[in-house]
Image: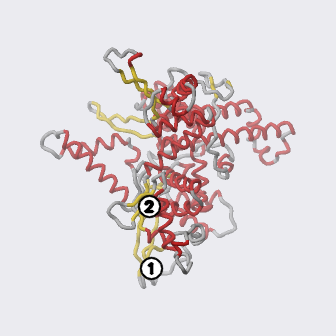
């Protein structure tokens, strides 16, 4: 593979150390049950002794979210890149950004090895750097990109949907790019064609892979890597702000500074919606001959063709945000399948697909408007709107003829708009235009997930109290007892349990200035974002324990695994005795179970944190 930066070439040692066959197993996983509650485990400080606490969550009083998050990040780096890179990442996670020399002195690793570890991390997009002027020299500081690192727990799901959305070649492209961090289209072709044996000719394989690669770039599942992407977001924002303020003769006021930041934010959004970087369009005459589907045709006029090609000198990486947007849209459509029927799901899925092209990030409040006529033209051909609706005799009239497709679609959209979830809305001031409240949909998804967790862990009475507070707002203990028709003693116990779990929040409203407890109102409420953050913290703790358990299981059978790596054993498995084969099957079964559980928890984290 050609060098990406600094003349350093990644070899087999620098590639991520993924567990053998784990990706292939996870690609075929079924969707997890929403009632799945992860088991929690506890390890000692040396990370070598495993203690099972019967599924009970045990947390230290001084632990916070960053502690569990740092531990999970460190274990991901250890599994994917090895122990040396883990030492460097651990220092950056605990102490923040620092230069190479300081990292080397803390980790007792040679500066050359530290630079190589940092280069591997930058190659795989999990480290960024910033340059600072200190006296007469420029010092480079390095920092871990936590968001990108935590997204690596979703790699099996990315591979699965890459194969589902872009067929087999799309899965191969995603796997090659995830293995190397970032690749050009030429390097990706070399990687796939050398590792793939197929009956088709080399030319046909090249055309098929290029077509899948181009489609992934066009749909923004792959994005171009620019040199500025290796810089921290805060440093880039400060540099842009400084360039604008340097143009002014006087120091900017607070209003001018806010205006500059709004302008830079709008410019950033505009850049994201502009033409895709790394995808060039060329105009060719109709006389040119094309071989098969070598190039994607966007417009065909009598003598002109606009075709799209991926630039060969641009590096690309996986865009996790686009995958998360699609997963969220799938969950929104499934809400209507559960609430109404499969036809409502298909309509919502079509609306979200039409609006997805202009979605920039997953935190947007509303989608772009979709015209009802455009929706009618893009509905699946096998959908039957007429048969899934019930009509009154007054609506059918004397003839009894059912309405046409367009009228049925309008009635379906009206039903979706009148639904209590209030996700689909009419765009104000535009006739026949509909938008989706992504903020409301994300809130409903988070609420449903938290309710399922509370119901599975504590029971339905706890969910009843939670729903009551979400509906009515702040309530006192006596009010909750009266509305829920439960004794005050039981209500007090349940409220304390939910507050300890992180779902409820207690607010004190004193009647007097002395804040005497007898003269104070104690109001209970549900802050959904805070409850989601508390649950994410617990899920990070469980994910780290599951990953640590995998290390423990492998270490117990280190001798057997070392024997299986021998060349003669790989070629002839009869060299393993029956006891060793049985032990190997047991290990694979345990590892697969732990990996599936971790992937399910990672999906829950994405819903609670990213949506």
Q: Residues within 10 Å of mark 1 (few under 14, many from 20)?
A: few
Q: Which is more toward the observer, 239 or 319?
A: 319
Q: CA distance from mark 2 to mark 1?
A: 25 Å
Residue 406 appears in the rendering: yes
- Left-right relation of 292 to 200: left
Q: Where is residue 15 shown, x and y percent of the image?
A: 58, 44
Q: Is residue 262 found left or right of 308 in the rendered image? A: left
**521 w.r.t. 528: above or below:** above
Label 1 secondary element: strand
Q: Which residue lies under the disc numbered 2?
A: 355
Q: Residue at x 59, y 42 (%)?
A: 13
- Determine if residue 203 is in view: no
Q: Nearer the viewer, residue 41 or 237?
A: 41
Name which of mark 2 and mark 1 comes first in the sequence: 1
Give above or below for 293 relative to 555: below
Q: Which mark is residue 405?
A: none
Q: Residue furthest left?
A: 249
User: What's the residue at 61%, 58% (across, down)?
Assistant: 163
Q: Are marks 2 and 1 in contact (CB under 8 Å)?
A: no
* Residue at (55, 61) in percent of width and height: 344
Q: Is residue 408 above or below residue 516?
A: below
In the image, which is nearer the foreground, mark 2 or mark 1? 2
Measured as percent of width and height from the top left, residue 212 is found at 55, 64
Please state the horizontal and vertical placement of residue 298, each as a whole percent of the image: 45, 73
Residue at image mark 1: 300
Q: Position of residue 549 (x, y in %)?
A: 66, 32
């Amino acid at each position: 593979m050609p060098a990406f930066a600094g003349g350093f070439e990644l070899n087999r040692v620098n590639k991520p150390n993924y567990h053998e066959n784990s990706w292939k197993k996870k690609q075929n996983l079924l969707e997890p049950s929403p009632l799945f509650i992860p088991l929690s485990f506890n390890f000692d400080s040396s990370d070598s002794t495993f203690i099972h606490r019967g599924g009970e969550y045990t947390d230290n009083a001084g632990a916070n979210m960053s502690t569990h998050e740092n531990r999970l990040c460190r274990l991901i780096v250890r599994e994917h890149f090895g122990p040396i890179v883990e030492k460097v990442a651990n220092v950056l996670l605990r102490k923040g950004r620092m230069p190479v020399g300081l990292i080397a002195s803390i980790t007792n690793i040679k500066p050359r090895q530290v630079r190589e570890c940092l280069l591997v991390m930058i190659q795989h997009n999990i480290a960024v750097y910033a340059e600072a002027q200190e006296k007469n020299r420029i010092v480079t500081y390095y920092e871990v990109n936590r968001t990108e690192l935590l997204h690596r727990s979703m790699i099996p799901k990315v591979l699965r949907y890459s194969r589902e959305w872009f067929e087999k070649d799309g899965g191969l492209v995603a796997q090659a790019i995830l293995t190397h961090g970032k690749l050009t289209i030429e390097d990706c072709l070399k990687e796939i064609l050398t590792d793939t044996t197929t009956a088709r000719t080399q030319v046909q394989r090249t055309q098929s892979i290029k077509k899948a690669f181009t489609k992934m770039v066009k749909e923004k599942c792959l994005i171009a890597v620019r040199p500025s992407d290796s810089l921290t977001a805060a440093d880039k924002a400060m540099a842009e702000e400084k360039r604008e303020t340097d143009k002014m003769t006087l120091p900017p006021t607070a209003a001018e500074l806010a205006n500059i930041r709004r302008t830079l934010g709008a410019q950033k959004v505009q850049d994201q919606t502009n033409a895709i970087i790394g995808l060039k369009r060329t105009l060719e005459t109709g006389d040119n001959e094309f071989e098969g589907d070598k190039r994607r045709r966007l417009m065909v006029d009598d003598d002109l063709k606009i075709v799209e090609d991926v630039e060969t000198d641009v590096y690309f990486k996986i865009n996790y945000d686009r995958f998360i947007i699609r997963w969220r849209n799938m969950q929104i459509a499934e809400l209507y399948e559960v609430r109404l029927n499969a036809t409502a799901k298909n309509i919502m899925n079509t609306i979200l697909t039409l609006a997805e092209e202009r979605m920039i990030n997953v935190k947007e409040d509303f989608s772009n408007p979709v015209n009802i006529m455009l929706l009618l033209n893009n509905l699946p051909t096998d959908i039957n709107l007429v048969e899934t609706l019930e009509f009154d005799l007054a609506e059918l009239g004397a003839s009894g003829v059912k309405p046409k497709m367009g009228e049925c679609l309008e009635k379906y959209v009206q039903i979706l708009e009148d639904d209590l979830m209030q996700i689909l809305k009419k765009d104000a001031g535009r006739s026949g235009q509909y938008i989706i409240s992504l903020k409301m949909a994300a809130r409903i998804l988070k609420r449903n997930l938290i309710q399922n967790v509370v119901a599975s862990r504590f029971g339905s009475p706890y969910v009843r109290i939670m729903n009551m507070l979400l509906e009515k707002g702040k309530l006192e203990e006596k009010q909750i007892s009266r509305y829920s028709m439960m004794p005050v003693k039981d209500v007090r116990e349940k409220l304390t349990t939910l507050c300890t779990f992180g779902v409820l929040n207690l607010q004190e409203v004193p009647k007097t200035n002395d804040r005497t407890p007898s003269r104070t109102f104690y109001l209970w409420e549900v802050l959904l974002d805070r409850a989601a953050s508390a649950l994410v913290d617990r899920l990070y703790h469980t994910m780290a324990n599951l990953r640590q358990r995998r290390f423990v299981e492998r270490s117990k059978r280190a001798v057997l695994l070392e024997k299986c790596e021998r060349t003669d054993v790989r070629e002839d498995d009869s060299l393993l005795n029956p006891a060793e084969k049985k032990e190997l099957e047991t290990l694979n079964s345990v590892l697969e179970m732990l990996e599936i559980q971790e992937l399910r928890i990672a999906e829950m984290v994405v819903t609670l944190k990213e949506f």
